[in-house]
Image (cartoon, rainbow, N blue to C red):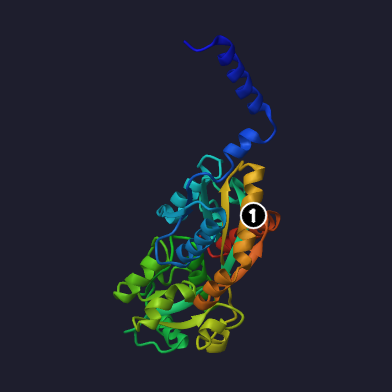
């Protein structure tokens, strides 16, 4: 039978250890197990590619697996909801996309940019206009002329969910040409990757997604990028002209992506993540990855990301109302 005095002494020692400042916290310092990183869009798209390089760099820096999980559906609602409703312990993070500043305007969800702990803005990209490799259009003006001459609904486009940023890009382009927002039918998809596959299979007439997202199929000869909806050309796709160059239409828009956690993320976890994300953003590996694919790099810390999302939310609401996508 154990000595009573020994048992009491051991218990006292454990109790003392528990109140030593930082000792218990150090034993459970974050991260001490794998972290899940949620991507709200399908594999093969720009969001998926960007979040995977970020997760890889965080894993190298913080010493635990950062496992990317694609949670698609509901025009982005499913994945964004999974991020917002996860326990705020740092073991579930995710990539917010511009759609979080759009979905609540459409009454798809009550979630909005204030539903999260913002960590870092990492990327911003404009859309392009892409057709299949077998399409007869060699430039965007030829495509635009064909669209104008066709009855409403004949041409079909995709790139994201209904009312998503690439849908808004199409609507803005149509309006800039003097056409109604629904003159080209929108086919909702779980992101640019699936949409580009449908385009290559001739299930769509065009896709409005970023040029990097269409790159693989363009280089394989299965698709052709005709224009970029930006003020200037992307150096990584220098042969793709702007809408203004090609057809005199002065229209531009952009999508953004950033890392966030559920609301209420502990301050020490947030600080550690922001430091690691800034290190990843500044790394040669990240910069080379983004540049080689033509992705734009745009950094903002939590305060800057919060302000950026608030401005995006107001702008997207106004644009969607103007486009007739929301009331």
Q: Nearer the viewer, residue 174 or 222?
A: 222
- Quarter of the rendering occupied by the C terminus: bottom right
Residue 83, visible in the rendered structure: yes
Residue drawn at (36%, 76%) of the image:
205
Task: Determine the residue positioned at 44% across, 88% down.
Answer: 139
Residue at 62% in and 46% down: 269
Q: Position of residue 224 (x, y in %)?
A: 40, 83
Q: Is residue 186 visible?
A: no
Q: Which residue is mark 1?
A: 274
Of residue 18 and residue 299, the one placed in the foreground of this image is 18
Quarter of the rendering containing residue 147: bottom left
Q: Is residue 37 above or below residue 185?
A: above
- Corner quadrant of residue 126: bottom right
Image label count: 1
At 51% from the left and 45% from the top, the residue drawn is 91
Camera-side residue: 257 or 9?
A: 9
* Residue 56 image position (x, y, % from top left): 50, 61
Q: Secondary structure at mark 1?
A: helix
Q: Position of residue 28 (x, y in %)?
A: 57, 38
């Amino acid at each position: 039978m154990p000595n009573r005095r020994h048992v009491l002494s051991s218990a006292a020692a454990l109790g003392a250890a528990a109140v030593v400042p930082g000792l218990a916290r150090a034993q459970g310092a974050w991260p001490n197990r794998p972290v899940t990183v949620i991507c709200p869009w399908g594999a093969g798209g720009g969001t998926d590619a960007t979040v995977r390089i970020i997760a890889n760099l965080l894993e190298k820096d913080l010493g635990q697996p950062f496992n990317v999980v694609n949670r698609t559906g509901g025009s982005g609602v499913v994945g964004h909801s999974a991020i917002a409703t996860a326990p705020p312990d740092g073991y579930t993070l995710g990539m917010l996309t511009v759609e979080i500043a759009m979905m609540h305007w459409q009454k798809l969800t009550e979630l909005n940019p204030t539903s999260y702990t913002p960590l870092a803005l990492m990327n911003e990209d404009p859309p392009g206009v892409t057709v299949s490799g077998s399409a007869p259009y060699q430039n965007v003006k030829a495509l635009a002329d064909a669209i104008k001459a066709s009855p409403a609904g004949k041409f079909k486009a995709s790139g994201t969910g209904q009312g998503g940023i690439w849908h808004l890009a199409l609507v803005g382009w149509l309006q800039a040409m003097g056409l109604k927002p629904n003159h080209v039918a929108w086919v909702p998809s779980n992101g640019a990757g699936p949409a580009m596959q449908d385009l290559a299979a001739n299930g769509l007439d065009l896709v409005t997604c970023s040029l990097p997202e269409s790159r693989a199929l363009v280089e394989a000869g299965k698709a052709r990028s005709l224009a970029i909806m930006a003020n200037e050309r992307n150096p990584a796709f220098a042969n793709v002209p702007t809408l203004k160059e090609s057809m005199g239409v002065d229209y531009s828009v952009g999508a953004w992506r950033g890392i966030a956690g559920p609301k209420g993320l502990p301050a020490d976890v947030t600080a550690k993540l922001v430091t690691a994300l800034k290190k990843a953003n500044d790394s040669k590996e990240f910069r080379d990855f983004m540049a080689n694919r033509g992705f734009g790099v745009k950094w903002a810390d939590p305060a800057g990301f919060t302000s950026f999302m608030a401005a995006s939310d107001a702008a997207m609401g106004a644009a969607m109302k103007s486009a007739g996508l929301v009331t």
